[in-house]
Image: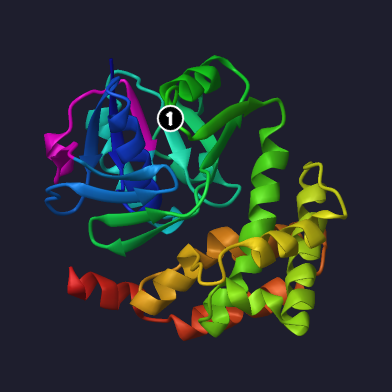
């Protein structure tokens, strides 16, 4: 049995914790800001209640076998406060976050060899503080090495599709292409159904094409057809689906705009690649959410 700490029980963390506990093979510990009695999850495979152990302060943390960081990308420094206790004996730290800068966010806190970047695609929403809805199959991809294969083994007995790849860079950039187009819902505050509009569809393609160009410059292997693939995936999703950036805007929270679209703009500048659609999206979201972080802190 492995002791697994999950830092950040949001939509992804809550669903992952529930599935891992359901196997009966692991001791699950949630690291949260406030007490959590139990987790209620609704998935394509059924609904149930999970009751993992909960820590509410980093000082309570003791060494575990694995740490899974599922906080938003902008809260990486906050997540890192738990690692001194949880990873004191060298436990690998899997980073289940959006974007392509997993290692960079935690480089100041742990040796690179201890970090396990994860491409995570988990269509889930938090519908109440401790209630989560998983709308489709959760997928995770890690580098094909010893730590990666051990990570995949944690999910044996669950319907989560965890796999290894020899090219993680391309995998995280493909996911970033999907996230890049998702900014549209965050801007117009409309669920996935908005992608059915032809003008919105073309904007989605342009956002993704910019991401493809920058990703290739960074060494990722990305097909031209990816722009259309991303759009069709959105159009095939439940029309009322709400992505995390959209949900954060509705709740007045800080958003992951830098990890999702800002990185495309930043790395585009590095390579001399123009990214006007992503640049506009970033400017608009940053303007509309200015002050959201301080307002969120005041509610805690």
Picture layout, residue 163 above or below residue 121: above
Q: How many labels does the image show?
A: 1
* Residue at horizontal 55 percent and vertical 58 percent from the top: 259
Picture layout, residue 158 above or below residue 149: below
Picture layout, residue 123 above or below residue 54: below
Disc 1 element: loop
Where in the figure is residue 258, as x and y percent of width and height? 55, 64
Where in the figure is residue 21, as x and y percent of width and height? 28, 31
Left-right relation of 244 to 284 = left
The quadrant in which residue 162 appears is: top right
The residue beneath circle 1 is 158
* Residue at horizontal 44 percent and vertical 33 percent from the top: 94
Picture layout, residue 184 above or below residue 151: below
Q: Image quadrant for the N terminus?
A: top left
Q: Image quadrant for the C terminus?
A: bottom left
Left-right relation of 164 to 213 = left
* Residue at horizontal 27 percent and vertical 78 percent from the top: 295
Q: What stretch is highlighted in magenta?
A: 51-68
Where in the figure is residue 157, as x and y percent of width and height? 42, 24
Q: Is residue 61 magenta?
A: yes
Where in the figure is residue 137, as x and y percent of width and height? 53, 44
The quadrant in which residue 127 appears is: bottom left
Q: Is residue 22 visible?
A: yes
């Amino acid at each position: 049995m492995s002791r697994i700490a999950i830092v950040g029980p949001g939509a992804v963390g809550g669903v992952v914790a529930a599935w891992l506990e359901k196997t009966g093979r692991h001791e699950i510990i949630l690291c949260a800001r406030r007490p959590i009695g139990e987790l209620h999850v609704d998935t394509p495979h059924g609904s149930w209640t999970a009751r993992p152990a909960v820590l509410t302060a980093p000082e309570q943390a003791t060494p575990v076998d694995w740490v899974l960081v599922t906080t938003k990308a902008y809260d990486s420094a906050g997540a890192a406060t738990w690692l001194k206790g949880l990873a004191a004996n060298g436990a690998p730290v899997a980073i289940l976050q959006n974007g392509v800068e997993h290692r960079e966010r935690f480089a100041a806190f742990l040796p690179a060899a201890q970090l396990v970047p994860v491409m995570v695609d988990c269509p889930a929403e938090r519908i109440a503080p401790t209630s989560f809805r998983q709308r489709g199959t959760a997928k995770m991809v890690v580098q094909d090495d010893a730590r990666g294969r051990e990570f995949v083994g944690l999910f044996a007995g669950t319907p989560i599709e965890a796999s290894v790849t020899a090219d993680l860079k391309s995998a995280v950039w493909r996911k970033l292409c999907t996230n890049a187009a998702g900014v549209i819902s965050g801007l117009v505050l409309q669920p996935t159904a908005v992608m059915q509009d032809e003008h919105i569809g073309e904007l989605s393609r342009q956002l993704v094409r910019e991401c493809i160009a920058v990703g290739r410059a960074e060494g990722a292997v990305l097909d031209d057809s990816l722009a259309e693939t991303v759009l069709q995936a959105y159009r095939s999703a439940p029309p009322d689906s709400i992505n995390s950036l959209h949900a954060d805007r509705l709740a007045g929270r800080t958003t992951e705009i830098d990890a999702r679209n800002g990185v495309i703009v930043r790395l585009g500048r590095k390579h001399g690649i123009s990214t006007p659609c992503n640049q506009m999206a970033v400017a608009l979201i940053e303007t509309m959410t200015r002050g959201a972080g301080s307002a969120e802190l005041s509610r805690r």
